Image: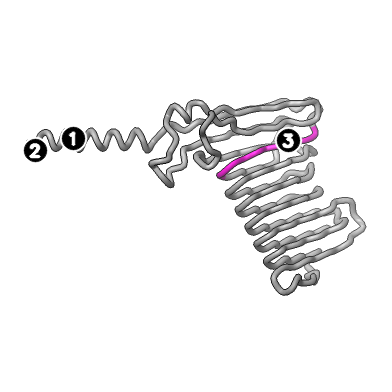
Amino acid sequence: MKFRMIIGLVLAMVSMSVFAKADERVFEQTLELDGVKRVLIDGGVGTIDVHASDDDKLHVVVTAEPDDDDLSKAPSEEDMAGIELDVDRSSRRIKLELDLPAGMDVDDVQEKWEVRIPAGVEAELELGVGQMDVEGVTGGLLISVGVGELNVDIPSGPIEISVGVGDVDVSVSKASIGKVRLDTTVGDARLRVNGERIEGSSHFGIGNSVKYKGDGQDEVEVSVKVGEVKVELDSQ
């Protein structure tokens, strides 16, 4: 009787392990750009990490893992095996996103994007939920985050950011400062230009708007519905 109980317990543990640890999927791409001026990364839930490439190629590594917050709803190994990396290429733009099998929701998978973008190429980055970090790119940024945290540290380039709920931290070290506008519906917005705090105006005490006009060419626009914005621009 004891032997049967032990066998049953072992089988139950094995079954749980297989169910809980569906295989992750890893995709790696190195792409020649050949005149492409914009790279679009469309992420679901997870993280996007973007740095400047040390050559003229686009380097992408994507890891997809089953979301383990609720094991009863975790995707199976078969579902995970059905995930593919979709690369949509035109003469001017490359778009990359994970193609999920029918019936799998975007929040069933945790995505980890590691992207290296060449100098002078615009990065269009979209993330549903999670954290995004961008460092060193110079071709301009167009960023959209539904819910999460965004950190940007670049030497120069135009920036347009839209966030639903979350905090934004932007630092530009060698900016050619043009028009700057920061807006929050609920939350604080702070702007420093060459170390000087630029004062803004409040929206009924729950939001904030800050505007600045420089004589440079790079425009910066950050809009957050709920959260805080901190932007530091240094042209020296």
Give how far across and how far down residue 56 sits, in percent. Answer: 74, 31
At a point 85% along the width and 56% down the height, the residue shown is: 177
| Residue 185 x %, y % | 71, 63
Q: Is residue 236 among what the camera can see?
A: no
Q: Earlier in the sequence, mark 3 or mark 1?
A: 1
Above/below status of 197 relative to 127:
below
Note whether 131 is above or below 64 in the view shown: below
The type of residue carrying mark 3 is Val
**Crowdedness near tag 1: few (<14), some (14–19) or many (≥20) residues, C-alpha within 10 Å:** few
Near-viewer residue (124 or 232): 124
In the rendered structure, the answer to whether residue 23 lies left or right of residue 53 reads left
Q: Are marks 1 and 2 in contact (CB under 8 Å)?
A: no
Residue holding disc 2: 2
Q: Is residue 77 magenta?
A: no
**Amino acid of disc 2:** Lys
The quadrant in which the C terminus is found is bottom right
Q: Which residue is mark 1?
A: 8
Sequence-wise, which precedes: disc 3 or disc 2?
Answer: 2
Q: Report if residue 219 is visible in the image.
A: yes
Q: Position of residue 25 (x, y in %)?
A: 50, 31
Q: Nearer the viewer, residue 230 or 56?
A: 230
The residue carrying pointer 3 sits among few (fewer than 14), some (14 to 19) or many (20 or more) residues within 10 Å by Cα, namely many
C-alpha gap between disc 3 and disc 1: 53 Å
Q: Name the residue tied to disc 3.
A: 39
Estimate the x, y position of residue 227 in percent, counting from the top left: 65, 62
At a point 74% along the width and 60% down the height, the residue shown is 231
Q: Which residues are magenta?
A: 37-46
Residue, x 73% and y 44% (percent of image)?
137
**Helix, strand or loop for disc 3:** strand
Q: Amino acid at mark 1?
A: Gly
* Neighbours of disc 2 within 10 Å: few (<14), some (14-19), many (20+): few
Instruction: Between residue 5 and residue 92, name the one nearer to us.
Output: 5
